[in-house]
Image: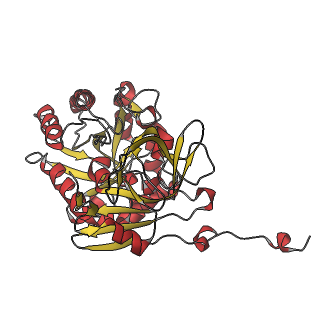
Amino acid sequence: MHHFHYVNGELYCEDVPVALIAEKAGTPFYLYSHATLSHHYRIFDAAFAGFPHLVCFAVKANSNLAILRTLIALGAGVDIVSGGELYRSLQAGVDPMKVVYSGVGKNEAEIRQALRAGILMFNIESSQELAEISRLAGRLRTTARIALRINPDIDPQTHPYISTGLKKNKFGIDIERALQDYRRARELPHLDVVGAACHIGSQITELRPFLEAVGRLKSLIRELAKEGIAIRFLDLGGGLGITYDRETPPHPQEYGQALVKELQGLDVTLILEPGRVLVGNAGILVTRVHYTKDTEAKHFIIVDAGMNDLARPSLYGSYHALHPVVERPRPEVEASLVGPICESGDFLAKDRLMPAFTPGELVAVMSAGAYGFSMSSNYNSRPRVAEILVKDTEFYVIRKRETYRHLIQGEAIPDFLKEAP
């Protein structure tokens, strides 16, 4: 559920008209509902009641400080994949002992940063990373808590670009060699082997892949116990999908009950890394129609948001529902909703039925709270858009719209180029 709804034909976010925000803030902008985000977290967390667990929000889904602070204040930890995400999370007030660090390419500076912060654990993605973290922990005279991220070779039945648990993917350590690397980790100085982890993909809409992963991790944990390696944390990653179009993902309660049932008998603390399922439907992208255009082949609706603002449709062919901010009687047309970017791949919706939007009106691109702003860019030298959070009857600018000055911040023209030709 979410708190975007119509009142007398006008779209509201909680108790604030979306058109009013557009009038005050300009377009395009991302708009988030605090009530929706809070509700989603509580529902997800409650799904694991009775089993020791920690919900670590996947920062990559949406890294705005206000979004992070909302979840952290509710008790969440974070799943991070970069030094920048760690910095953001600490600025938002996260307890370092609720930080899990994944990612295949952690560099020396990032590892040092995390060690100094005292994070809960690193999810190790390769044998070489194992040795590097041991080396750096030794130099800092500390001990790094680690888990091995296992690649269980499971097909999550999702888009190939967001599948992460197959042998051909770059993530994790093959399950066949995991025992060997755990033995090695036990022998390396400055490491404390505390966990096992896996993450099989994103936008997964059935339980089977998750349960298969749990089964394989359970077998590994029992094998490790025979070797005297006690696993205290089992990190099952994230990946639970949401409804964009006609998907029917399991409810978090169903998901939680199924996982807890599979985990009975294991003495571990479960770590979950939800991202999309918490914030996806808590946010929308609001854009304004500039023009409509007809060719012999098709009908175009041209808006002021582009693929640089919301990359998912161009990158994955993803579906986002389109709603008018102000309802009125109108026909549907087969069209493409496109932006101003100089690329044929610049579309938010392609060749599909949609309301016959007209110049000047506002369009709400739904389910845009995850992997929306966090994947946006300055392509075509376009300033990134504002982010706005609504709570009850008030709205707050939680990220100002960039200006042209922001576009050249940090750039410089060398003196030899300043000379007249």
Residue 93 seen from this side: no
Residue at image position (13%, 46%) is 47
The spot of residue 93 in percent (x, y) is 30, 69
The spot of residue 421 in percent (x, y) is 92, 70
Residue at image position (26%, 29%) is 220
Left or right of 259 on screen, residue 324: right
Q: How many marks?
A: 0
Residue 279 seen from this side: yes
**Which residue lies most toward the left here?**
50
Instruction: Give 287 or 158, whichever is nearer the viewer.
Output: 287
Quadrant of the rendered structure where residue 149 is?
Answer: top left
Left or right of 400 on screen, residue 4: left
Q: In the displayed structure, would residue 136 be above or below residue 296?
A: below
Residue at image position (28%, 56%) is 282
The spot of residue 403 in percent (x, y) is 56, 72
Indicate how the structure is coloured in the image.
secondary structure
Instruction: Give 336 or 126, whichever is nearer the viewer.
Output: 336
**Which residue lies most toward the right here?**
421
Left or right of 286 on screen, residue 53: left
Q: In the displayed structure, would residue 310 be above or below residue 246?
A: below
Instruction: Give 405 or 305, whichever is nearer the viewer.
Output: 305
Q: In the displayed structure, would residue 398 be above or below residue 250?
A: below
The spot of residue 158 in percent (x, y) is 37, 32
